[in-house]
Image (cartoon, rainbow, N blue to C red):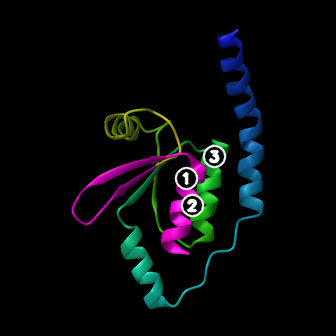
């Protein structure tokens, strides 16, 4: 029975994923407009953030939309198609689960944050 649900959800993701991507492309969120100086500060603060994601994952789309809405320049890595990114995610975060935000502070300490709602809340609090 467990195997049935695994394949059911995987199939549903492949059917719904393209629809979600099309919706995201047709109706992108509007980003925050900042002065050039403010945007440079935000860019400097977000340069140590990396989002590990799968392109068609609805929870990853949710985080990418929040990133667009907050006008953030955060590097994204596809942990499904890029083997090196997948290995980094497993080695650093301990599991291959997306979305995952890698946060590296100025001292070089790294935190791996999972769950789209938690990531979006963090981004909202830090950059809104």
95 in magenta: no
**Percent position of residue 89, x then y:** 39, 39
Left or right for 60, reference 73: right
- Most extreme residue toward the top is 1
Mark 3, secondary structure of its residue: helix
Quadrant of the image containing the N terminus: top right
**Percent position of residue 12, x then y:** 75, 30
Residue 121: assigned label = 2
Residue situated in front as seen by the camera: 5 or 53: 5
List the residue tagged with mark 1. 118
Q: CA distance from mark 2 to mark 3?
A: 14 Å
> Few, some or many C-alpha atoms within 10 Å of disc 3 (few <14, some 14-19, many ≥20)?
some
**Region in magenta:** 101-128
Mark 2, secondary structure of its residue: helix
Could you tell me if the residues under marks 1 and 2 are in contact, i.e. CB atoms within 8 Å? yes
Residue displayed at 32% across by 40% down: 92
Check the image and report above or below for 19 versus 50.
Answer: above
Select label 2 or label 3 by which is in front. 2
Residue displayed at 58% across by 49% down: 116
> Few, some or many C-alpha atoms within 10 Å of disc 2 (few <14, some 14-19, many ≥20)?
few
Residue 7: assigned label = none
List the residue tagged with mark 3. 59
> Few, some or many C-alpha atoms within 10 Å of disc 1 (few <14, some 14-19, many ≥20)?
some
Residue situated in front as seen by the camera: 82 or 30: 30
């Amino acid at each position: 029975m467990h195997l049935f649900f695994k394949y059911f959800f995987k199939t549903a993701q492949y059917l719904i994923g393209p629809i979600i991507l099309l919706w995201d492309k047709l109706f992108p969120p509007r980003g925050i407009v900042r002065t050039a100086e403010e945007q440079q500060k935000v860019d400097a603060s977000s340069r140590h953030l990396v989002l590990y994601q799968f392109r068609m994952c609805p929870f990853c789309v949710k985080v990418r939309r929040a990133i667009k809405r907050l006008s953030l320049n955060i590097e994204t890595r596809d942990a499904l198609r890029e083997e090196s990114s997948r290995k980094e995610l497993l080695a650093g975060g301990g599991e291959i689960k997306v979305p995952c935000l890698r946060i590296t502070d100025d001292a070089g300490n790294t935190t791996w944050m999972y769950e789209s709602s938690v990531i979006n809340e963090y981004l909202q609090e830090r950059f809104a």
